[in-house]
Amino acid sequence: MTAIESTLVKLSVDFDVQKIRKDFPVLAQKAYGKPLIYFDNAATSQKPQVVIDALVKYYSEYNANIHRGVHYLSGKASQAYDDVRKKVHEFIGSKVEQEIIFTRGTTEAINLIASSWGRKNIFEGDEIIISTMEHHSNIVPWQLLCEEKKAKLKVIPINDVGELLLDEFEKLISPKTKFIAIVHTSNSLGTINPVKKIISIAHKHNIPVLVDAAQAMAHEKINVMDLDCDFLAFSGHKMLGPTGVGVLYGKLSLLEAMPPYQGGGEMISSVSFEKTTYNEVPYKFEAGTPNVADVIAFGAAIDYWNTLDRKAIAEYEHELMSYASEKLKTIPGVRLIGTAKEKTSVVSFVIDELNTLDVGMYLDTLGVAVRTGHHCTEPVMSWFKIPGTIRVSFLFYNTKEEIDVMIDGVKKAAAFLKK
Ligand code: PMP
């Protein structure tokens, strides 16, 4: 037994993965007659039964529009929706509940900040700093803003293993730097960035920081007051919740000073043709009928997270990542992309001479779901001079045995496709 295998055996004593798997009905099925192995968790996580049940219960028992109804169902739905804001506030340790704004996801949360905070505070000649390893959703909104305002986008470079060059970051800061938007955990490299340090450097220059926590939320406990970030964005669907709901956290004073993002119902205090006044935060940023059902089901996901031992899970996922990385490295022709010291359970790799899509399609025939391509991080691929990677991303319900099947598949693919 290798050192890694023995650690896994030890960990399984603390963490009963088979019991956990029973909470996720989708994992029990077969794909093409083979047990389904789901390694595409960075794209979206699977959902526990409690989340599915919450959706069904809402639609079958208390579906109603919220906040404006005086009737029984509306009261019940409003209460359930409002309760989730409190749950999220407690989950990420915000100062007050109003700092939680529901969005469609990380993408919309970042666009909200770029449109609202950005349009008000960015002017010609100003600079915004992002990094090489941003997801497109933390690049394009800033490019659009910079184009509109004639501002400049500056990019923190990375090293060969996929870590940010912090010295270079400090050199990029100038009196013109007005905003920093940075990914906490990279979806294509798995790198966990030293965001707390970045935020503290930025704050010495009075620069606000937005953290893209789309990947981070499912792998570690984030506390916004501890990080001291000014804004934080994440998606429910990557952390056991349904699609179509995400969160923007912002410090209350910043949110209060921002203009609305979209106009419509709910976000107003009063409307006349002469003058419209806006509702208070967070409602000012939630125009129209919100995604009531998914927010409520997201609340069930948070309840589920609160039953889990996050420390044990993090250790277990780290073991899965190390185990897969070590095994992949032994396969001739395989090269890992992204080997930062601080890494989450994402493993990206390429195989000499092989098209990543072909490998992904071959693994699919074995029931193994992986992702191939640029993972919406084209600048990362350009930096590594590759068109894309094969990415396996684990969550706590995955197992070492599933990794063995994938490894076997990669070996076969390498031999078979090269012929
Ligand atoms: N940032 C990161 C790091 C991501 O991984 C993703 C999703 N892959 C996003 C942002 C965008 O998230 P969403 O599509 O849920 O808005």
Image (tube, rainbow, N blue to C red):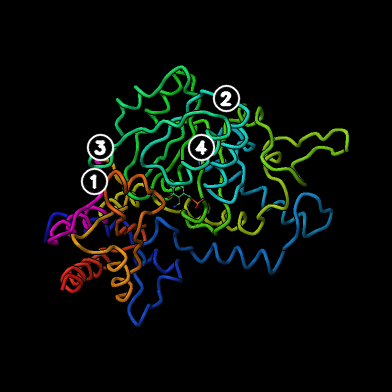
Identity, as a three-letter code, of the amino acid under mark 2: Phe
Residue at horizontal 37%, vertical 28%?
Answer: 197
Q: Residues within 10 Å of mark 4 (few under 14, many from 20)?
A: many
Left or right of residue 222, residue 105 in this image: right
- Measure the C-alpha gap from mark 3 to mark 2: 31 Å
State yes or no: discs 2 and 4 in contact (Cβ < 8 Å). Answer: no
* Badge number at residue 123: 2
| Residue 172 on the magenta segment | no
Name the mark nearer the viewer: 3 or 4. 4
Residue 223 rendering spot, x and y as whole percentages: 46, 37
Residue at horizontal 71%, vertical 67%?
Answer: 61
Quadrant of residue 332 within the rendered picture: bottom left
Element marked by disc 1: loop
- Measure the C-alpha gap from mark 3 to mark 1: 10 Å
Compared to residue 35, the image places residue 65 above or below, namely above
Residue topped by disc 3:
159
Identity, as a three-letter code, of the amino acid under mark 3: Asn
Residue 300 rendering spot, x and y as whole percentages: 56, 57
State yes or no: discs 1 and 2 in contact (Cβ < 8 Å). Answer: no
Residue topped by disc 1:
339
Q: Which residues are magenta?
A: 320-341
**Count of marks, rendered view:** 4
Q: Earlier in the sequence, mark 1 or mark 2?
A: 2
